[in-house]
Image (cartoon, rainbow, N blue to C red):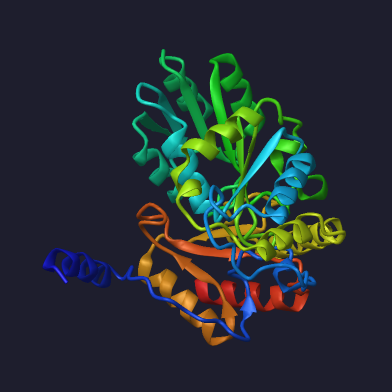
Amino acid sequence: MDQKLQDKLNKRIQEGTIRSLSLFDDFVDFYSNDYLGLSKLKNEVSEYSSYASSGSRLISGTSKESLDTERNLAYFFGVESALVYNSGYDANLGFFSSVPQKGDEVFYDEYIHASIRDGIRLSFASNFSFKHNDLKDLESRISKSTSIKYVVIESLYSMDGDISPLQKIADLCSRYNAFLIVDEAHACGVIGEEGKGFVSLLGLETSVFARVVTFGKAYGAHGACVLGAKNLIEYLINFSRSFIYTTALPPDSYSRILFTVLHPEITARQNRLEEIIKYFRDRIYPLVCSSDIISPIQSIRIGDIEKTKAISDKLQRLNIAVKPIFSPTVPIGNEGLRICLHAFNTEDQIDLLVNSLKDFIK
């Protein structure tokens, strides 16, 4: 390997931020995105389904299951059309690399997901970040723009679990004729009636240009979709390279998506998750949690790499799986613990986690 690459790796090791793969069998789960526990549900696979799609969607990968799934997703989320991608990363990469054009301007929240940042970099549009959830900063930037404008946010942010001021951002975009794109990866399944997310909860379906919904988190499946107008989906089919040039999901994956998105237990599991979140937050005081009371992601800032790692290691020795979060995933100085709560967590597990955290952080 070239020495420049080894030097970068060595720097991570020296900083204490080197990443590695970990397996947490038989641990108490406070780290996964399986917020509703739907990944553990089994659904019957049709005997007529294939185990492979055999090609991209534009060749042989379009199946009855894929078309049925996209039609049902569009109806469920209240939009004209839906297009399923192989993952949320693929969806964001394909959308942002193809939709904003040269001369356009993209304004994105500084805490936006890496997949969106990568997609924006692949486009020929100019791009500018604005301060996290800061309406004044966003308005000061888009009000000066005379170009086609795209504003990109998450409805529920993946690291701190905080909520965007979606209604106010939608109002700003309407006032300044900007196209609003909302990534609902961590909100759908968890937030809103039947888990339809914040856009639906606020009735903003017609105010949002595009939504990205992923199925590998609360829905316990795989893949993602872009929701929007029929002509937008037609455009993506023709110009979104991460959709065009990849082998499609197998038919079983599409069946799994519908099985979980439309599952009759969604509301009951949402209610149980809300109980667990409230139970945790009532007991974690006086430790500071920066995330919202309805968020399954609860963040505790430590602000030091070594202390964060030490606390995480101590929790893992108790068979409690909590992931430490370091730079570059979060800014330097924002290191801490990202605690994911689930409908299947118990009050006893919460008590063990909270009591351990209070002891270790003290």
Q: Position of residue 68 (x, y in %)?
A: 75, 50
User: Which of the two residues, 202 or 358, is positioned nearer the viewer here?
Assistant: 202
**Residue 125 occupies which quadrant of the picture?**
top left
x, y percent for residue 66: 68, 53
Left or right: where does residue 286 sit relative to residue 256?
Answer: left
Point out the residue furthest to the front here: 60
Quarter of the figure with residue 297: bottom right
Task: Name the residue nearer the viewer: 331 or 270.
Answer: 270
Q: Residue furthest left?
A: 3
Look at 59% across and 67% down and name the residue there: 52
Residue 40 in view (yes/no) = yes
Identity of the residue drawn at 63% across and 86% down = 26
Occupied quadrant, residue 319: bottom right
Residues 57 and 71: in front is 57
Tell me: residue 31, above or below residue 264.
Answer: below
Estimate the x, y position of residue 88 in percent, counting from the top left. Answer: 54, 52
Asked if 353 appears above or below 54 in the picture, the reply is below
Q: Residue at x 41, y 54 (%)?
A: 330
Q: Is residue 229 visible?
A: no
Q: Total marks drawn? A: 0
Which residue is found at the position 43% from the left and 69% from the top?
308
| Left or right: 292 as drawn, with respect to 344 | left
Q: Is residue 303 above or below residue 97?
A: below
Pinpoint residue 65: horizontal percent, then vertical percent.
72, 56
Q: Quadrant of the N terminus?
A: bottom left
Q: Is residue 303 above or below residue 210?
A: below
Left or right position of 167 against 135: right
